Amino acid sequence: MKKLSARRRHPLAALVVLLIALAATGGLYATFAPADKAQAQGESTTQAEKIEEGKKLFAVGCASCHGTGGQGTTDGPSLVGVGAAAVDFQVGTGRMPLQQPGAQAPRKPRIYTDDEIEALAAYVASFGPGPSVPAKEDYAPEGGDIARGGDLFRTNCAQCHNFIGKGGALTKGKYAPPLDDVSPKHIYEAMETGPQNMPSFGEAQLTSQDKQDIIAFLDDVNGEDSVSEGGFDLGGLGPVAEGLFGWIFGLGALVVVAVWVAAHTAKAKKS
């Protein structure tokens, strides 16, 4: 008993007891802690790693125009609040980094991989809240209403992009690009973020379902299995322009044929 009492009075006894208690607490926490909480901590670490990688890529390929913190310069706009979706669209379609100044950034082959684009998007998203990259179920054409999407497209988009998304000229060298070979995800992101001359369509203007319906319409009229109803589509200019074309050139051709027939009939009578 005297030996045990002496050990209890040892200066390191309290420290040993504390270490044992901490080890036991840690073991119990690891055993009974909720799995989703541990997973969230892992995801947080992964996101931090993405942001750090994106910061390095941004410093090399973007900071010269947009500033080291995305605040913008005389050569490029601020990226604060544009969100991950804007980066995924601009970099994923090759429009950024900009090759040279011009009326607008053209689409070109991209120079970053999917992982690099994801890292860049994560870093820019850390500047401030903005539209996030949509999930596949948000933009999959199979989830949209084609007829309703056609109505929405003609109301909101056809003025610039043409009746079925074939594109069109704008002022001062600008243009609305064709949409027949654009991925559904990038079409959705363009509506969300409003790149270049295009206005952005938030939930107040077009809901997520509205956007998916428009994508379903474009996929139907420009997809691999699409068929032009009634023969030549004449560039998909729309019923008014195509009808006018038919009246002018169709009636013109009939007038020419009528004159030719009349002339030859008169000549035959004289002979």
Image (cartoon, rainbow, N blue to C red):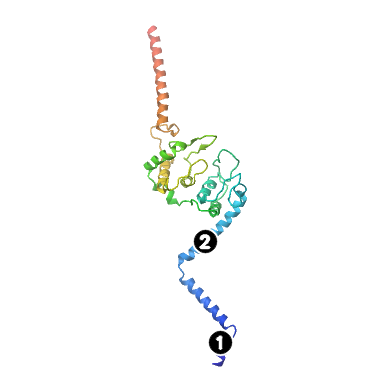
Tell me which numbered mark, 1 or 2, is placed earlier along the sequence. Answer: 1
* Disc 2 packing (10 Å; few <14; some 14–19; many ≥20): few
Q: Residues within 10 Å of mark 1 (few under 14, many from 20)?
A: few
Q: Is residue 228 above or below residue 21?
A: above
Q: Position of residue 117 (x, y in %)?
A: 54, 51
Name the residue: 40% across, 19% down.
255
Q: Quadrant of the N terminus?
A: bottom right
- What secondary structure is marked by label 1? helix
The C terminus lies in quadrant: top left
Residue 150, percent across and down? 39, 40
* Count of numbered labels shown in the rendering: 2
User: Helix, strand or loop at disc 2?
Assistant: helix
Reading the image, the residue beneath label 2 is 44
Q: Position of residue 64 (x, y in %)?
A: 62, 48
Q: Position of residue 254 (x, y in %)?
A: 39, 20
Q: CA distance from mark 1 to mark 2?
A: 44 Å
Judge depth for marks 1 and 2 and give the one in front: 1
Circle number at residue 25: none
Label drawn at residue 8 = 1
Q: Residue at x 54, y 62 (%)?
A: 45
**Dot 1 amino acid type:** Arg
| Label 1–label 2 contact, CB within 8 A | no
Front residue of this view, candidates 5 and 216: 5
Hey, what amino acid is under mark 2?
Answer: Ser
